[in-house]
Amino acid sequence: MAKEKADEVVPQGEPHEGHEAEQALHDKQAMHTAEEALHGEQIAGDEELPPHKRAKKLRKLSDEELLALAEQAAKAEHWLEVAKRSQAEMDNAIKRIKREAQDDLKYAAGSLTRELLPVLDNLARALQSARQAQDFKALADGVELTSKMFIDALARHGVTPIEALGQPFDPAVHEALMTTSNPELENNAVSMELERGWKLHDRVLRASKVQVNKK
């Protein structure tokens, strides 16, 4: 019997019961403080009362209510400062993004310009050679080479010519300026390209001006 009594386990309270009690007391005190602060806030925010009457009512508050009101005011001031700093940081970020976007737009043509400078140089050399030799074939060859360099430079930046001649007329990329009647061509086919059109990737920069065959 003595051994059995020695093996008995005496029930003890849960280890977190004390913590729960402390938390409940803390919550109760916080709620009480908030209620006291709310009383003071209601008086201070009562715009129907003249300022001197509001001040008189505030002076009648207990020390606990005044301390609670001061605590709430300090918290409000803190979060107001946080909000002001956050707004300032956001404003600075927006200004920086706008400035960077403006710089990107300002210098967006830089890479294309670098590609076109050799084209301009080549055209200048062709003109100089033609003046010195009076060789119009050399001039024509130089201009043709320059034109090819120019088109290649544009293509590297996504600018490509629109196919027109012999293609079915497409109002999305073609602009019909005149019509003709050629039995050897399909109806509504582009019979002549009057001015080349261009696209930037999939966007039309300029539609091709064309003559359209009608039967």
Image: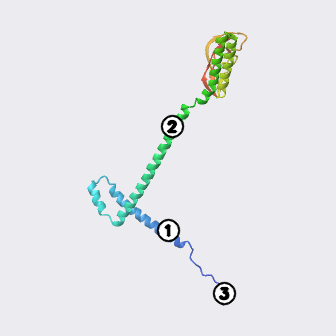
Q: Is residue 75 above or below residue 88?
A: below
Q: Which residue is mark 1?
A: 23
Q: Quadrant of residue 61?
A: bottom left
Tell me where residue 65 appears, x and y as whole percent. 36, 64
Quarter holding the C terminus is top right
Q: Is residue 213 visible?
A: no
Q: Which residue is mark 2?
A: 99
Tag nearer the camera, 3 or 2: 2
Q: Residues within 10 Å of mark 1 (few under 14, many from 20)?
A: few
Q: Between marks 3 and 2, how big is the CA–CA gap?
A: 85 Å
Considering depth in this image, is 53 or 88 the residue closer to the camera? 88
**Dot 3 or dot 2, earlier in sequence:** 3
Q: Quadrant of residue 165?
A: top right
Q: Is residue 32 visible?
A: yes
Q: Is residue 46 above or below residue 156?
A: below
Q: Amino acid at mark 1?
A: Gln
Q: Residues within 10 Å of mark 3 (few under 14, many from 20)?
A: few
**Dot 3 or dot 1, earlier in sequence:** 3
* Residue drawn at the location 48% of the way across and 46% of the way down: 89
Q: Between marks 1 and 2, how big is the CA–CA gap?
A: 52 Å
Q: Between marks 3 and 1, how big is the CA–CA gap?
A: 40 Å
Element marked by disc 2 = helix
Q: Quadrant of residue 111?
A: top right
**Left or right: where 70 falls relative to 177:** left
Question: CB atoms at circles 1 and 2 under 8 Å apart?
Answer: no
Q: Which residue is mark 3?
A: 4
Element marked by disc 1 = helix
Q: Residues within 10 Å of mark 2 (few under 14, many from 20)?
A: few
Element marked by disc 3 = helix
Considering depth in this image, is 51 or 11 the residue closer to the camera? 51
